[in-house]
Image: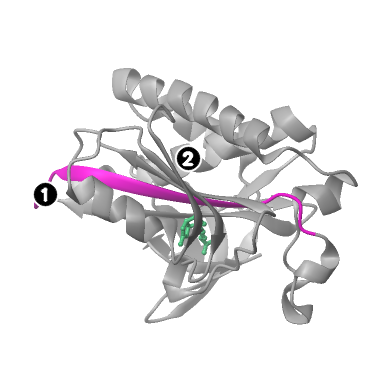
Amino acid sequence: IGRHIHYEETVDSTQKIAARLAFEGAPEGTVVVAEEQTAGRGRLSRIWHSPKGTGVWMSIILRPAIPVQQAPQLTLLAAVSVAQAIEQVTGLSVGIKWPNDILIGGKKAVGILTELQADPDQVNAVIIGIGVNVNQQREHFAEEILPIATSLAIEAGTAFPRASLMQAVFLQLEKLYKEYLTNGFGIIKLLWESYAISIGREITARTVTSTIVGTAKGITEEGVLLLEDRDGRIHAIHSADIEI
Ligand code: BTN
């Protein structure tokens, strides 16, 4: 991973470029990284602010031979890799909020967006988009997101070279991805759970169609969140916004 790197100064979204490259047959491990994104994409059709030179904005192409239902596992795998890389490089301790927000001191420092090219039931390419707020200072964030967003520099009180962080992410990701391809999701699931901050707690899950309040029970083998509501019913959440 990271042997083929497409470096761009300014792009609309590295996801878009990586998707095009993947479609054109780019090999597994290809990475698109940009200094700045003018239309960075977040989960649930949100915008991801990606100001120049402050963060790691990159998209990684993987081509695992897995059925489409297993693709969420790769999102969790990516979250664990980034969590490990941040701990290594910064010494900060991090938590993961399902599925893949990385929080430091309760605020979000990393977002991960996974997109699929499938054909039709088998995965052809997974595009893992990773946005790490590295060196932003408070004034980089809009007033309304300051209570919920942070950067590694704000949390650690010092700046970090973005290249070191990227390198650590590539190494961790490659290690876990190999483990995943050889032995399956088992170890990754355990690692993910060791970082999880929502499991066992009362959360609110907002899906496209409903809002469910309940206790997060854990994740399934597929990476789906299990939520027990107040009537004791278990809901399988595939995609939602989680509030703890
Ligand atoms: C989220 O909503 O939490 C996911 C944010 C993902 C942002 C990254 S930055 C690099 C890649 N390119 C994009 O347009 N989005 C992802």
In the rendered structure, does residue 241 fall within the stretch colored magenta? no
Residue farthest right in this picture: 157
Q: Disc 1 and disc 2: Cα gap in Å?
A: 22 Å
Q: What is the x, y in percent for residue 60? A: 40, 42
Residue 216 vertical placement versus 6 (above, below): below
Total tally of numbered discs in the picture: 2
Q: Around disc 2, counting alpha carbons within 10 Å, would you say few (fewer than 14), some (14 to 19), or many (20 or more)?
A: many
Residue 108 vertical placement versus 77 (above, below): below
Secondary-structure class at tag 2 = helix
Residue to which mark 2 is pinned: 78
The magenta span reads: 119-136
Q: Return the residue nearer the eye: 78 or 26.
A: 26
Q: Are marks 1 and 2 in contact (CB under 8 Å)?
A: no
Q: Amino acid at mark 2?
A: Ala
Secondary-structure class at tag 1 = loop
Residue farthest left in this picture: 120
Give the number of the disc on residue 164.
none
Q: What is the x, y in percent for residue 79? A: 53, 43
Give the number of the disc on residue 121.
1
Q: Around disc 1, counting alpha carbons within 10 Å, would you say few (fewer than 14), some (14 to 19), or many (20 or more)?
A: few
Q: Amino acid at mark 1?
A: Asp
Q: Is residue 72 left or right of residue 241?
A: left
Quarter that holds the C terminus = bottom right
Asked whether the viewer can see residue 166, the reply is yes
Asked whether the viewer can see residue 69, the reply is no
Quarter that holds the N terminus = top left
Residue 188 vertical placement versus 196 (above, below): above
Residue at position x 36%, y 26% from top?
180
Residue 181 vertical placement versus 127 (above, below): above
Q: Is residue 87 left or right of residue 57?
A: right
In the rendered structure, does residue 135 fall within the stretch colored magenta? yes
